[in-house]
Amino acid sequence: SAAEKDGYASFMLKEIAEQPKAVADTLLGRIDPSGSLTLDELRITPADLRQIDKVVIVACGTAFHAGLIAKYAIEHWTRIPCEVELASEFRYRDPILGGRSLVIAISQSGETMDTLMALRHAREQGSKVLAICNTNGSTIPRESDAVLYTHAGPEVAVASTKAFLTQLVACYLVALYLCQVRGTKWGDEIQAVIKDLSKISEEVERVLETMEPVRALARTLAGKDTVLFLGRHVGYPVALEGALKLKELAYMHAEGFAAGELKHGPIALVEEDMPVVVVVPSPRNRSLLHDKIVSNIQEIRARGARTIVIAEEGDEAVVPYADHLIRIPATPTLLQPVVATVPLQVFACELAAARGNEVDQPRNLAKSVTVE
Ligand code: G6P
């Protein structure tokens, strides 16, 4: 009903707006004022966490994209090798698992059959399974060794938004907690990240306040057939997520690519006036990556693309090549997906509405898929 939507035109818009609170609630009580993490609820002992020699993440859809981003954070911060796999592929290829593997199953609903079957397989191989889940008492956390709940609150729209942002936060917390118990890299970089993570909900709020031009842009693109999304590093899974949202909601041909792969194929797709969304990494730390993506923007623009550039505030290098520029606050590189995904959600939601689609209940999709 309209009342349940709190005055928003759709549950999706309401849930996008709830993201600052969802993120803050997921952090609540888990970072203490001294900057150390408390995840008592985890129920896997620090001794067990010190034994882990591999992390394997399994998930589907949007939750899989959260897993792809988590891999960058886990490997960079903890130095533990991390694999990410679509839950539906996992058990069918005889994955190498053992007692020292930590399997993380990410699921909003906690009922996705593909993810459940993957975690059952992992437990049969003797691995510990940690669920990152938004639904209390659902099947996936019940069958896991431990659970870290995301506190997004109920998500009604089929396309996941606030659950995704909280999955990212939960993954960062797990990665940082692994650093803490294992004593890895527990220095200035990690302390700075924890500080920035604890403020990230305010940054999400700031992004939401600047979304009007994104909505206006989305409406002008309602007649397009194809939108491409490019990113590098953690911006690559963000590009995949932006494309998935557009497929789900706008029923458009949308594809995400790693920007470095452009020259190996996807650039052949670029046509006159085709919208291409580019997620630009921070110009600060990984400036080499930044320079390369600026060249990519020039390359596609020279071939006629209409460039929609998502870049940090203060990044001036992109300005000459951006037909449309969407600003996001500066964050540490690994946290950027939390802010960079928001404009892509708004973009897809508005474009779908402009095409006359039902954004909360896209055709052919279900909120929770309980068959394999
Ligand atoms: C369905 C939904 C997606 C969701 C995926 C995984 O396909 O339409 O939005 O990302 O399931 O759901 P889960 O509840 O496991 O996160």
Image: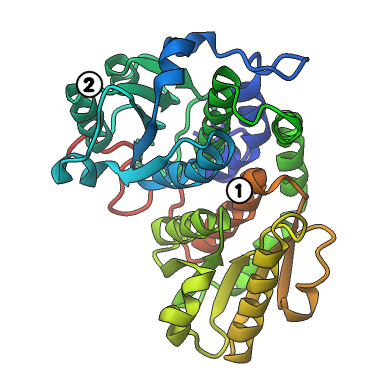
Label 2, residues with CA under 10 Å away: few <14, some 14-19, many ≥20? some
Report x, y in % for residue 168.
Answer: 54, 37
Report the colour scheme: rainbow
N-terminal-most mark, 1 or 2: 2
What number of labels is visible?
2
- Secondary element at tag 1: helix
Residue 337's tag is 1
Amino acid at dot 1: Pro
- Say whether residue 317 is left or right of residue 345: right
The CB of the residue at mark 2 lies under 8 Å from ligand 1 = no
Relative vertical location of residue 284 with respect to residue 39 in this rendering, above or below: below
Report x, y in % for residue 87.
Answer: 27, 41
The CB of the residue at mark 1 lies under 8 Å from ligand 1 = no
- Residue at 45% x, 11% y is 47
Report x, y in % for residue 169.
Answer: 58, 32
- Residue at 85% x, 60% y is 314
- Residue at 73% x, 36% y is 189
- Which part of the image, by quadrant, shows the C terminus? top left
Q: Is there any visible trace of residue 216 in the rendered image?
A: no
Residue 289's tag is none
- Residue at 33% x, 24% y is 100
Amino acid at dot 2: Gly
Mark in front: 1 vs 2: 2
Relative vertical location of residue 48 with respect to residue 176 in this rendering, above or below: above
Q: Is there any visible trace of residue 165 in the rendered image?
A: yes
Observer-nearest of 171 and 51: 51
Residue topped by disc 2:
126
